[in-house]
Image: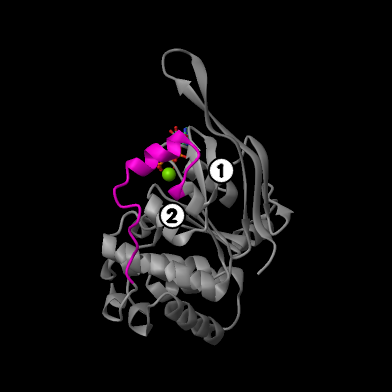
Amino acid sequence: MTGTVLEVSGLRKEFVIDVPGKGKAHTLVAVDDVSFSVSAGGALAVVGESGSGKTTVARMIAGLEQATAGHVYVDGVERTRPRGAAQRLAQARQVQMVFQDPYSSLDPRQTVSSCLDEVLRLHHGGSAAERAARIHELMSQVGLDERHEGLRPKALSGGQRQRVGIARALAVKPSLLILDESVAALDVSIQAQILNLLNSLREELGVAYLFVTHNLAVARYVCETTLVMRRGQMVEYGTSDKVLRDPAADYTRRLLEAVPHVDWVPRRRTAEEMDG
Ligand SMILES: Nc1ncnc2c1ncn2[C@@H]1O[C@H](COP(=O)(O)OP(=O)(O)OP(=O)(O)O)[C@@H](O)[C@H]1O
Ligand SMILES: [Mg+2]
């Protein structure tokens, strides 16, 4: 696996906020001159305290938010505001997002198979039989099986729902998966299973990750590189080993001190746990 899947340079986002009663607007700089890259099949963690701009960076890369300045290249092509539905779909096939709460991002009325089928129909077409085969393949990739295909989100556990969210994102074979606090809402033991799943999926499929988290132990478990942000700016950027074991910045050191279990490593998942 060679090359760069994502390159971000000079990224900036200003939000203009109305101040009620004052008749004037205030500009908040949420992201200020952020630059980094992710190699094909690589994994970068974006860490930092609440409000540091992590989600805003992720949303600009995914095309959910327009950057005030800067450039985003995916597979060597600059991401611009899509012109028309075809370009929007093509951009969505390159970068997919997995959200924190799979409950609100899955349609409660839709079964797992119809949720996946909808994505496949939209992006790839193909016969019903071809799509069914692909759904089986996706289910097994995320550790689910036919028994789960006919279920609605309410009938699934939190971990299973997040597996469906990951399957839906993988359905279009993206080069980059953006995961924004994607395990934060889960119990620690279920978190560990999902993190192990993400590690094996990356190995198996070569998909790259941009992994947004406030959990530094999780960052190091999944990602070989880490970017630390504070107040919209880059504080530190390098290998996770260096940044999280021997940080150069005081801010990173303080973040590390606030986490008692930075050496926490999930156990390998066992067969019974796969049901979680
Ligand atoms: N749509 C918006 N309008 C105005 N301000 C916004 C908007 N989205 C984010 N902000 C502001 O931008 C800053 C960065 O927010 P962001 O959500 O990127 O932080 P974060 O690092 O993801 O935080 P958290 O860890 O709590 O998720 C915050 O000050 C936030 O209030
Ligand atoms: Mg966020």
Name which residue type carries label 1.
Answer: Glu
In this figure, which residue is indicated by the disc labeled 2? Answer: 219
Residue 87, quarter of picture: bottom right
- Residue 239 is at least partly visible in this image: yes
Question: What whole-number distance in Å separates the C-alpha atoms at marks 2 and 1?
Answer: 24 Å
**Residue at image point 73% right, 56% down:** 76
- Judged left or right of residue 3, residue 113 is left
**Quick check: marks 2 and 1 in contact, CB under 8 Å?**
no
Which secondary structure lies at badge 1?
loop
Q: Residues within 10 Å of mark 1 (few under 14, many from 20)?
A: some
Residue 29 percent coordinates (x, y):
54, 29
Is 162 inside the magenta-drawn segment? no
How many numbered markers are drawn?
Answer: 2
Which secondary structure lies at badge 2?
helix
Near-viewer residue (68 or 53): 53
Point out the residue furthest to the front here.
246
Q: Quadrant of ligand 1?
A: top left
**Residue at image point 26% right, 80% down:** 272
Name which residue type carries label 2.
Answer: Ala
